[in-house]
Image (cartoon, rainbow, N blue to C red):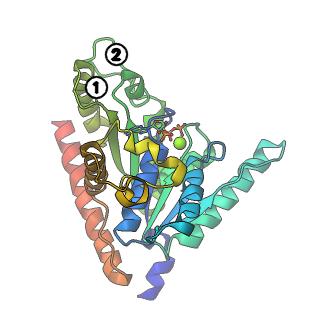
Amino acid sequence: MAEDFDTPDLRSAHVIVLGNEKGGTGKSTLSIHITVALLKAGYRVASIDLDVRQRTLTRFLENRRSWAQTAPWPVELPLHYALDRGASENVNDNETMEFTAFAEAIAAVEHAYEFVVIDTPASDSYLMRLAHSLADTLVSPVNESFIDVDVFSRVHHDRTRRGNVAHYADLVLEARRKRRLVDNGIIDWVLVRNRSLSIQSNNARQVGMSLKRMSAELQFRVAEGLHDRVIFRELFPIGLTALDPIETAVQNQTLTSSQLSGRREVETLVQTLRLPVHQPGMEHLEARHRWYEGISHFYRNLAASAGE
Ligand SMILES: Nc1ncnc2c1ncn2[C@@H]1O[C@H](COP(=O)(O)OP(=O)(O)OP(=O)(O)O)[C@@H](O)[C@H]1O
Ligand SMILES: [Mg+2]
């Protein structure tokens, strides 16, 4: 039985990739919150920052590590890998170096950790594509704007009509094809609405309808994600999130209703991702197979309803 762990399709870590070629949609913010939520739920979590330029996730974790040194309560930290930027003049050399570092990070954690959270940059690169094809769950944050929608499907001026599959969706479909060939794996693609406003505008409704229409063709789910809240951005310098006991850490008072709502939104988001429940060893592998069956069933139904 133990040798099952050596075969790539039975790796024990569930890989969550945050991806969207559109910049600034909230990939790093969601990777921070998902990582901390999983740590707080007691899972062994590793994180990888593929954004070699901005390193937002890495910067957050550095801040969190230094806070952890003085905090009166335990501050959970993932095992983190930050990829360095290749310094060579030769692009191929840089890509090779980055790929080697990424492959080493994955190999080091895939059997020992239950979740691997990978934050990706907005720019298209070989590494970013590779990360997408490793995803078990791909989370793409999307803001309430047709500019954001346009990277999935070209927005038609008559918005009831279907546009062509756009570059980022194409990249995900390609990653899915590769993944199926490699280990028959399925990428559960979840579009997460981010920075939504409390008062729903006509624009937000139309964006929602467009995403719903596309979901059957591109085979993604849409999740209600996070509202636009100060709590999701103000704690970055001290490496904390809405899930941490900030009422004692920085405020010494009760949380505001917006802060409490922010906390609940993150918890709901993680539930919506329908991540496999992990137990050690074979139990975990069985849970993973059951999860795959559930997700396959979901996509078979989706494909059937799209064909009707
Ligand atoms: N739900 C939210 N509420 C408030 N601010 C948010 C929220 N999500 C993201 N932001 C803010 O939006 C900006 C972009 O977010 P973030 O850096 O996470 O996006 P990104 O997709 O990782 O960007 P990039 O493509 O540049 O890597 C940041 O200033 C962040 O603090
Ligand atoms: Mg980012």
Q: Mark 2 or 1 closer to N-term?
A: 2
Query: Which of the 4 image quadrants contains residue 282?
Result: bottom left
Which residue sits at x=58%, y=36%?
123
**16 or 200, nearer to the observer:** 200
Looking at the picture, how far across and down is residue 89, in whole percent?
A: 84, 42
Res 56 seen here: yes
Which residue sits at x=46%, y=79%?
5
**224 or 263, nearer to the observer:** 263
Looking at the picture, how far across and down is residue 302, in whole percent?
A: 21, 44
Which residue sits at x=28%, y=37%?
215
Q: Quadrant of the N terminus?
A: bottom left
Q: What residue type is disc 1 on?
A: Val
Per the image, the residue denoted by label 2 is 156
Secondary structure under the numbered disc 2 in the rendered image: loop
Looking at the picture, how far across and down is residue 133, in whole percent?
A: 49, 52
Against 17, residue 20 (above or below) is above
Q: What residue type is disc 2 on?
A: His
For residue 12, the mark is: none
Q: Quadrant of the C terminus?
A: top left
Residue 304 lies left or right of residue 265; in this view the side is left
How far apart are the two marked residues, 2 and 1, measured between alpha carbons?
12 Å
For residue 207, the mark is: 1
